[in-house]
Amino acid sequence: MRIGVITFPGTLDDVDAARAVRFAGAEAVSLWHADEDLHGVDAVVVPGGFSYGDYLRCGAIARFAPVMTSVAEAARGGMPVLGICNGFQILCEAGLLPGALVRNAKLHFVCRDQWLRVENTSSAWSARYEPNAEILVPLKSGEGGYLADKSTLDELEAEGRVVFRYVGENPNGSARDIAGICSQNGRVVGLMPHPEHAIDPLTGPTDDGLGMFYSALDSLVAV
Amino acid sequence: MARVVVDVMPKPEILDPQGKAVAGALPRLGFTGVTEVRQGKRFELEVDDSVDDATLAKIAESFLANPVIEDWSVRRVEP
């Protein structure tokens, strides 16, 4: 299995995302923002960082990068895509996921280990978890507040598309404590916290994040 | 040639923590009586005659603003 990891100018977490892919037993393939070619990968991770310096809005310029045209097309065809932090912002800007991420309600950049509840265990990136499992992964973002209009939020809840929800105090003002959501077909998932930093107790708080990468491999084998 | 101004503002129902922080600082600076501040963005575009209003609207709607969270308005300030 080959999982692509995109690098934009300003991406920070591509190295850790590639490491997580390898930890899960897949081959990590570097994808460059200016290259439309996805090099035959089976899934894509859009990692965190500050693509294009967060100019205009987080993810607003990255969504027009040549590689994103191919990712959007592949995602519509059912390819698993995971957006982490800035990657989540990019997927929202690209219209692959509904809603938007805005400045944290208390303005502070939040950097801490965060408990999440896995509420959807049928998406391509969460099937390995037990329903309602609580996992501990790092959260580090200044614009992590998830917002959408009420009808979109109701639709996400009704369709079970809230994949991850913050446990305990809401860290950033996200609507309904939402930490991560998925597309209608469950193949595209975005979340603000960082599973790729929690794959090895030596370098992260837990290895709870690894399940997302295993889940993607499971979903590819199932196809 | 014309100068076009595009104003982008957070939608009224969206919490604007930056505006709130500015509003909170004003009394500390001795300015009283300001009851609310909303912070947005202003873009100034120099465009040639080939750029019509429909194109400007498209630029604002699809790129300069995120319609999920922001309202936008376009106006030509120099004919």
Image: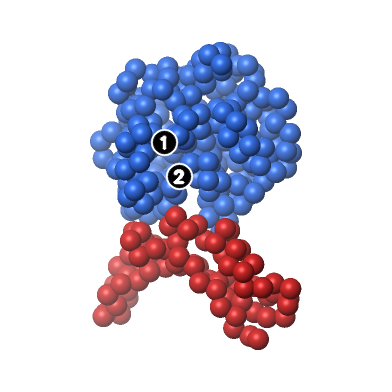
Chain colours: A blue, B red
Whether pointer 1 and pointer 2 mark residues with C-beta atoms closer than 8 Å, the reply is yes
Please identify the quadrant where the N terminus of chain B is shown.
bottom right
Q: Which chain carries label 2?
A: A
Q: Name the residue under label 2.
A: A98
User: Extreme bottom residue here?
Assistant: B79
**Residue occupying image coordinates x 27% and y 75%:** B35
Q: Position of residue B36 (x, y in %)?
A: 30, 72
Residue A45 placed where, x, y %? 57, 31
Q: Can residue A13 be seen in this view?
A: no
Q: Which of A201 and A136 is in front in this view?
A: A136
Q: Residues within 10 Å of mark 1 (few under 14, many from 20)?
A: many
Look at the numbered disc 2 and give the secondary structure of its residue.
loop
Relative to A13, is B6 above or below?
Answer: below
Q: In whole angstroms, how far apart are the C-alphas of marks 1 and 2?
A: 9 Å
Q: Residue sitting at 41 percent across and 36 percent down?
A: A180
Disc 1 with disc 2 on a shared chain: yes
Q: Could you say which is closer to the camera, residue A9 or residue A32?
A: A32
Q: Which of marks 1 and 2 is nearer the N terminus?
A: 2
Determine which quarter of the picture holds residue A6: top right
Horizontal and vertical percent for residue A209?
Answer: 44, 24
Image point (63%, 37%), residue name:
A73
Disc 1 marks a residue whose amino acid type is Ile
Q: In this view, does B17 lie to the left or right of A73?
A: left
Q: How far across and how far down the image is residue A52, in percent?
A: 62, 50
**Residue A127, quarter of the rendered image:** top left
User: Badge 2 local density, few (<14 within 10 Å), some, or many (20+)?
Assistant: many
Residue, disc 1: A181
| Residue at x-position 52% and y-position 36% | A83
Quadrant in which the C terminus of chain B appears = bottom right
